[in-house]
Amino acid sequence: MGLSDPGQVESVQEQSQCALEEYERGCHPARPGRFGRLLLRLPALRRVSAAAIEQLFFVHLVGKTPIETLIRDMLLSGAAFCWPYVPMQ
């Protein structure tokens, strides 16, 4: 919502996919098909609501702060962003 440059969105998506592929190949070199299987899971993951994802993964780290705000702040700050470390209990 509010995105105005489809080319930039496509570029970020491509970079994210390449980074995930590199990470997967590095962590699981003996399982070359793992990355492809992860990509096949994406349509099912799109059916999970944003509120459910926030509740499951982010509420323990960031509390009630909307994830959109955090992502926007991280993207706008670039390399200067310093994520606070909060140990899990």
Image (spheres, grey):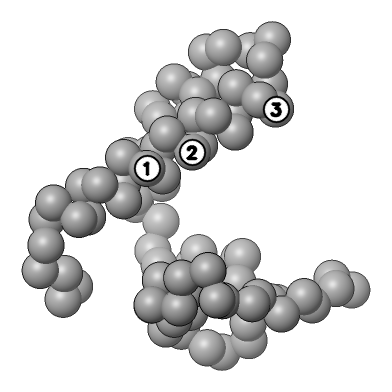
Per the image, the residue denoted by label 3 is 27
The residue that disc 1 covers is: 15
User: What is the quadrant of the C terminus in the image?
Assistant: bottom right
Q: Which residue is mark 2?
A: 19
Q: Is residue 46 above or below residue 38?
A: below
Tell which circle, 1 or 3, labels the residue nearer the N-terminal end: 1
Q: Position of residue 31 (x, y in %)?
A: 63, 12
- Residue at image location 59% in from the left, 33% down from the top: 23
Q: Who's the residue at 56% across and 76% down the image?
A: 81
Position of 5 relative to 39 (above/below): below
- State the residue lying farthest toward the front: 80
Residue drawn at (66%, 25%) of the image: 26
Tag 3, which secondary structure?
helix
Residue lying at the far right of the rendered structure = 89
Categorize mark 1 by other alpha carbons within 10 Å: few (<14), some (14-19), many (20+): few
Q: CA distance from mark 2 to mark 1?
A: 6 Å
Q: Which label sits in the foreground, 1 or 3?
A: 1
- Name above or below for residue 51 compared with residue 28: below
Q: Measuring from the top left, give residue 49's x and y in whole percent.
A: 39, 63
Amino acid type at mark 2: Ala
Pointer 3 local density, CA inside 10 Å: few below 14, some 14–19, many at least 20:
few
Residue located 12% across and 55% down the image = 6
**Is disc 2 in contact with disc 1, using a CB cutoff of under 8 Å?**
yes
- Contact between labelled residues 2 and 3, with CB atoms less than 8 Å apart: no
Q: Quadrant of residue 84?
A: bottom right
**Is 49 on the left or on the right of 61, as rendered?**
left
